[in-house]
Structure formats: C-alpha cells, structure tokens
Image (spheres, rainbow, N blue to C red):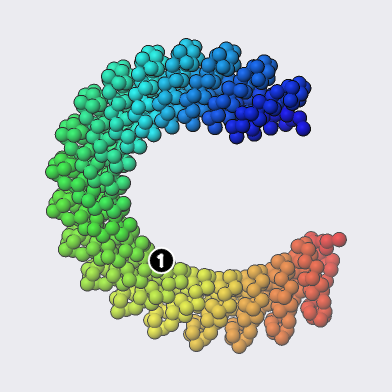
C-alpha cells in the first residue's frame, strides 16, 4: 500500500489519533519510498488541522518539521486561513497555538497568522473562555507584530462572544491596551455597544460593569447603556435580570450621560418585563430613585400597553403595580380604561378572572381609570364567551363587580357574545348570557337577534345542546327565543349540509322549536335537502323527507327546482341518496324526485362524472318510476356526449343499452355534431 494514497489519508488518521511514531514512518522516504511517502501538506494540510484541534503537540511538530516531513511536503500552519490555529484556540490548546505561530517550528513563510479571517481564532478562544490562549494570540512576541490577533476586528466580535458567555477575565484582557495593543484593543462601544446588549441579555452583571467602566474599557471606548434606545436595558428587562437593569440605570456605574433610559421608545423595557411577569424589574423601571426622575418608565405610555401585555399574560401582581400611583406615579399610572379598556379584553380572552377583577376595581385602578366592561360593544364579554370562560362572563355582567353603569351588556352588537359562545358550543356560557338574573333583564342576550344567528352557528357546528337552549322559552325568554324558521330556515340548511342529523331533528321538532317557529324543510325550494344530498348525508335526507319528523305540510320535496336534489346527488355519485329521493314511500308519491326532469339533467351529471351505478338507477323504471325514468336520448343524447367526452366507456355502453335505458329511450350516436365520440 502507498502512504500517499487518497491524499495521504493514512497520515491523517494516525495524526488525529496521536500516533507520532506511525506518522514518522509514513513520512520516512527510506521506509515508505521517496515517491510514495505521505505528504503532510496534502488536502491543505488537513492532518495538521485536525491534529491541532485534538491537542497532539508532538505530532503537530513532526508534521511541520522539514527534516521529517520533507521541505516540500511539510504541513503548512497558515493553510486555509490558519484553520489549524482556530481549531487549537477553540479547544484551549495553548502549547499547540504557540507552536503553530512559532517561525522556528512552522517556518517563517508557513507560520499561522492570528489575524487571519478577522482574528477568528481570538473570537473562538474568547467564546470558550481560554484566557491564556487569547493572551498568546495578541502577544506580538509570540504571534508576530504584523500577525498578532486584533481584538477590535469585525467590530470587536471577540469581546461580544466573551461577554455573552460571561468570561469577565477574557473581556478585561481584550480591552487592556497593554495586552491587546493600544490600536488593537477591543472597543466596548462598537456596534452600538452590542457587547453590553448580549451580556445584559445573558444576565452577566460583572461583565456589564466592566464594559461600562472607563478605567477598564477606556474613556472613549466604554459601553454606552443608552445606545440604540437603551437596547441593553430592554434585553435585561425581558429576561428578568433586575441586578443588571439596576446597573445599566445607575449614573455612577453607567455614567450620568450614558445611563440607560427606562422611558426610551415609549417605555419599551417596561412592556417587555410586564409581559414576562417580572414584577421586581417593573418596579425598578418606574422608580424615580433608580431610573431617574426624567428617565423613569411611564406605565400610561402607548395607551397603557404594558398593562395590556401583563393582563393578557395573567400577571396580576404586575397589573397591580402598574396601576398603583405610589409605584407608577399619580400622573403616570396605567389606565385600565385606555383604548376602550383593551387590557380587560386581553385578560377576559385568556380567562384571567383575578386580573379582570383588579382592572374593574375602582380602589385598585382608580375611579376615573377603572376598566369598563361595556366598552367597545362589550368586546371583553364576547372574547370570554368565545373562549368559554363562564366565570369571567359572570363577573363582567355583575353590577357589583363591574359597576352598574359599566357592566357588560350581553345584547350588545346584536348579542354577538351569544353567537360566539353558541358557535363554540359553550352551553353554560349561553345559559348565563340569556339569564335575566345574571345579565340583567334589559341587557340579557337575545337568541332571535340577526335572524337567530346564534342558532345558525350552533346548528352548523352540530351543538345540539346549545340549539335546544336557544329555542327554549324558559331559558331564552318567550319573546327572545331563537326561531328555527328564520331566514327561510337557514339553520336547518346549515345543519343538513354538515350532516348533523340530531340538530336537524331538533329544529323541525314543534315541541323543541315551537309550533310557530319550527324549521320548515320545504323552505327555499327544499334547499336543506339539496345540501344534504350533495354531501351524501342519507340519514339527514331521510329525516327531511319524513312527514312524521318534518311535518306533513312542511316535509322536503325531492321534486323541487326540477328535482335539483337528485341532480346534486347524481353528480357526487351518492347512489343510495338518489334511490331515497326517487322512492315514493320515502319521498312521497307526489314529491318524489323525477329523473327525467330538466331533460334528464341528473343523468347528464352522473354520466359526465362517470357514476355508472347512479346512471343505472336513474334509468331503472322499478326505481325511478316508469313515467319518471331518465331518458338517455333527451336533448339529442346529451348524456352520451358528456360520458363520451369524459372517456367513460362503461357509462356510454349503459346509455346505449336497450335493456338498461329502454328501447325507446336509449342514447343514439351522431344525433348532434356538437360532440364527437372518442376514437
């Protein structure tokens, strides 16, 4: 085997494992052969790259030794932008790093350069906290004056990496002009004091202090806490690092002109801490002694948005602080009625009853600033009802809690809260909204609002229990009960389309819906039957056609609109439904669907879609009736044309079969030149 095969792969494997003796043999021309010896510089000195990361100093020395590896084949430490140095630096192998940069070991022209790739080796070492390695990389005596790592490279990236990881000793080194060099020292105010931001976010208080220290970081290079609208403070506040926030706002630590300002960007730091529930941080940000009288966070900024966020997240303690004049300041306290009491809506939506109570309490929120449950058409009630928070709904309508003049009104916006609860199937909430003792006699929800929209929503979703409540005169009120026949019995159409058979039965039941308000299956030309037929809900179709269920005079009529229901079922291929619609015992002798209606349109639809079984039924006199059977030769055998153009050979055969279609009604070819049989 040849030692230089596959880019000297054997040498790479041996070097990574630290087998110095094996490496020596593979590179020895007397052992491996002059032309077959392993070459240490193969693949950009890959063997050296990986060995340096593993920390095998003795192997690295051999690979770079011209006497061992050969003058032209020795490994080059500066290959691939001194990647070997980066690997060793990241892993903290100081001895290897020193060797790679030593011109006596690596060669003057091949030594690793610590400033390669924007001093990436320094960034990697700093990120891992290898102070000794960082010192070596920046030392001109070790790395070379022109090749030393520069701590200010790439906007002092090495400093950001060390600051984020909390390596205070490394940060100190990077900013030290004696270690890093006066012109190359890291600058803590680079990129809007980004190093301070990452340290603050990670909660590295000691690092933050160093970065802002003019003695350590340099008077002109110290981090500025109010940079980029006090971004560092926002990050620390969001994460709940109270000690860091205090440092950033301290004029002694951060500097009087550079201290973070808690009111920056509409008191954004307060929003973030309130949303996360950091009460201690919120208190600090609003404290004039800590944040400064002119820089304190203002809880009423942006329509008291901090309060909205805290309310939405359910942080009752934070909400209390934001509304407390003793903490937030009399003129700056959050106002619970801001933006149409949006905070109350946010809390109600999530079901935070304790927060809702606080927001409406005049003793906590202030008489003139307490939340109004009736605001914006009682939208807080709508949100709570939709989510099924019965306890919150009760509270919002309670005059003792919400206030007689500010209580939520269940009939607001056409009883929208009832519609929302009905749609979601929250029966307990619906009951509360319609209860005059809970909602108030004049404010109770009305189930017949907007043509009984709540009933339509519940029927569509299949909530039979809710439908029953909405139509119950004892629950909804005699004059306000939902009417199943509203808007041409559209609730029945919605339930039929979705296949909710139990709901359909209820809507047509005179005892449940009321004799004068029951849904009528024959309304809108028996639209409910069409919808059910289209979707293939045979059980619903049967109910709609049943005189005992739908009522003798109100039963659906399968022959309405030229037997439209049959057309829909035929098109969708619902054979069983088609059979039901044409059955005189089910649909009624005078109301059965007629397959020959509209020039046998149902047959055309079935033929086009390729439903052979349906076509057979439609033409069968025993099923469709002798006088009502579909005629395949209607409109110059239009059904045959539809099947032929769609390529349904089996259907074409049926339509032309005298036994299936009838000798006098069979389809005939070439009656019309508007369609052509496929070859």
Packing grade of label 1 (10 A; few <14, some 14-19, many >=20) is many
Q: Count the marks: how many?
A: 1
Horizontal side of residue 124 vs 602, given as left or right: left
Query: Does 584 appear above or below 184?
Result: below
Q: Which of 164 and 525 lies nearest the eye of the viewer?
A: 164
Tell me the quadrant of the picture where the C terminus can be found: bottom right
Q: Position of residue 32 (x, y in %)?
A: 74, 26
Tell me what residue is drawn at x 24 percent, y 41 percent. 281
Query: Does 509 appear above or below 251?
Result: below
Q: Position of residue 133 (x, y in %)?
A: 44, 24
Residue 188 falls in image quadrant: top left
Residue 411 falls in image quadrant: bottom left
Query: Does 54 appear above or below 575?
Result: above
Q: Where is residue 466 in the image (x, y as percent from the top left)?
A: 38, 73
Horizontal side of residue 606 vs 390, given as left or right: right
Query: Does 657 appear above or below 112?
Result: below
Q: Which of 518 and 164 lies nearest the eye of the viewer?
A: 164
Residue for badge 1: 423
Tell me the quadrant of the picture where the N terminus can be found: top right
């Amino acid at each position: 085997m040849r030692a230089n095969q596959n880019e000297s792969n054997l040498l790479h494997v041996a070097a990574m494992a630290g087998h110095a003796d094996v490496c020596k043999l593979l590179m020895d021309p007397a052992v491996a052969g002059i032309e077959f010896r392993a070459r240490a510089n193969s693949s950009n000195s890959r063997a050296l790259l990986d060995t340096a990361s593993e920390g095998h100093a003795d192997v690295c020395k051999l690979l770079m030794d011209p006497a061992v590896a050969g003058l032209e084949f020795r490994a080059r430490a500066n290959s691939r932008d001194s990647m070997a140095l980066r690997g060793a630096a990241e892993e903290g192998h100081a001895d290897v790093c020193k060797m790679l940069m030593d011109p006596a070991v690596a060669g003057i022209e091949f030594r690793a350069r610590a400033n390669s790739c924007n001093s990436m080796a320094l960034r990697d070492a700093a990120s891992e906290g290898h102070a000794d390695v960082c010192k070596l990389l920046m030392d001109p005596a070790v790395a070379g004056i022109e090749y030393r790592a520069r701590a200010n490279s790439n906007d002092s990236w090495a400093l950001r990496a060390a600051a984020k990881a909390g390596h205070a000793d490394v940060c100190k080194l990077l900013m030290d002009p004696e270690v890093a060099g006066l012109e190359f020292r890291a600058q803590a105010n680079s990129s809007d004091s980004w190093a301070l931001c990452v340290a603050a976010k990670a909660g590295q208080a000691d690092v933050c202090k160093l970065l802002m220290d003019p003695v350590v970081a340099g008077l002109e290079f110290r981090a500025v806490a109010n940079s980029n609208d006090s971004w560092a403070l926002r990050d620390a506040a969001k994460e709940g690092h109270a000690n860091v926030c205090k440092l950033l706002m301290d004029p002694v630590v951060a500097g009087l002109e550079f201290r973070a300002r808690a009111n920056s960007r509409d008191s954004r730091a307060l929003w973030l801490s309130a949303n996360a529930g950091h009460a201690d941080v919120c208190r600090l940000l609003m404290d004039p002694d800590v944040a400064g009288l002119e820089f304190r966070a203002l809880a009423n900024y942006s329509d008291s948005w901090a309060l909205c966020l805290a309310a939405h997240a359910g942080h009752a303690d934070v909400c209390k602080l934001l509304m407390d004049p003793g903490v937030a300041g009399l003129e700056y306290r959050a106002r619970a009625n801001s933006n149409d009491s949006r905070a109350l809506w946010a809390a109600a939506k999530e079901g935070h009853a304790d927060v809702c109570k606080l927001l409406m309490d005049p003793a906590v929120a202030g008489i003139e600033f307490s939340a109004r449950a009736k605001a914006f058409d009682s939208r807080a009630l709508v949100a709570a009802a939709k989510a099924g928070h019965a306890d919150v709904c009760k509270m919002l309508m309670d005059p003792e809690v919400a206030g007689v003049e500010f209580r939520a009104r269940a009939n607001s916006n056409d009883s929208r809260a009832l519609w929302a609860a009905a749609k979601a199937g929250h029966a307990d909430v619906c009951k509360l909204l319609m209860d005059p003792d809970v909602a108030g006699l004049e404010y109770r929800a009305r189930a017949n609002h907007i043509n009984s929209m709540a009933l339509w929503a519940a029927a569509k979703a299949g909530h039979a229990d809710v439908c029953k409540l909405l139509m119950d005169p004892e629950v909804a009120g005699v004059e306000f009960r939902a009417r199943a026949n509203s808007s041409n019995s559209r609730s029945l159409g919605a339930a039929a389309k979705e296949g909710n058979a139990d709901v359909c039965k209820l809507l047509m039941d005179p005892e449940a819906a009321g004799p004068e308000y029951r849904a009528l299956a024959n309304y809108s030309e028996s639209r409910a039957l069409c919808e059910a037929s289209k979707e293939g809900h045979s059980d619903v179709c049967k109910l709609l056609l049943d005189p005992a269920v739908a009522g003798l005079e109100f039963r659906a009529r399968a022959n309405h609109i030229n037997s439209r229901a049959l057309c829909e079922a035929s098109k969708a291929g619902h054979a069983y439904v088609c059979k039901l619609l044409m059955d005189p015992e089910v649909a009624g002798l005078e109301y059965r669907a007629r397959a020959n209606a509209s020039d046998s349109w149902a047959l055309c639809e079935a033929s086009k879609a390729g439903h052979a079984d349906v076509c057979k039924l439609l033409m069968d006199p025993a099923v469709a009736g002798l006088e009502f059977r579909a005629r395949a030769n209607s409109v110059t055998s239009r059904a045959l044309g539809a099947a032929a153009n769609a390529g349904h050979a089996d259907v074409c055969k049926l339509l032309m079969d005298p036994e299936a279609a009838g000798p006098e009604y069979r389809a005939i070819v070439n009656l019309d030149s508007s369609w052509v049989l496929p070859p």
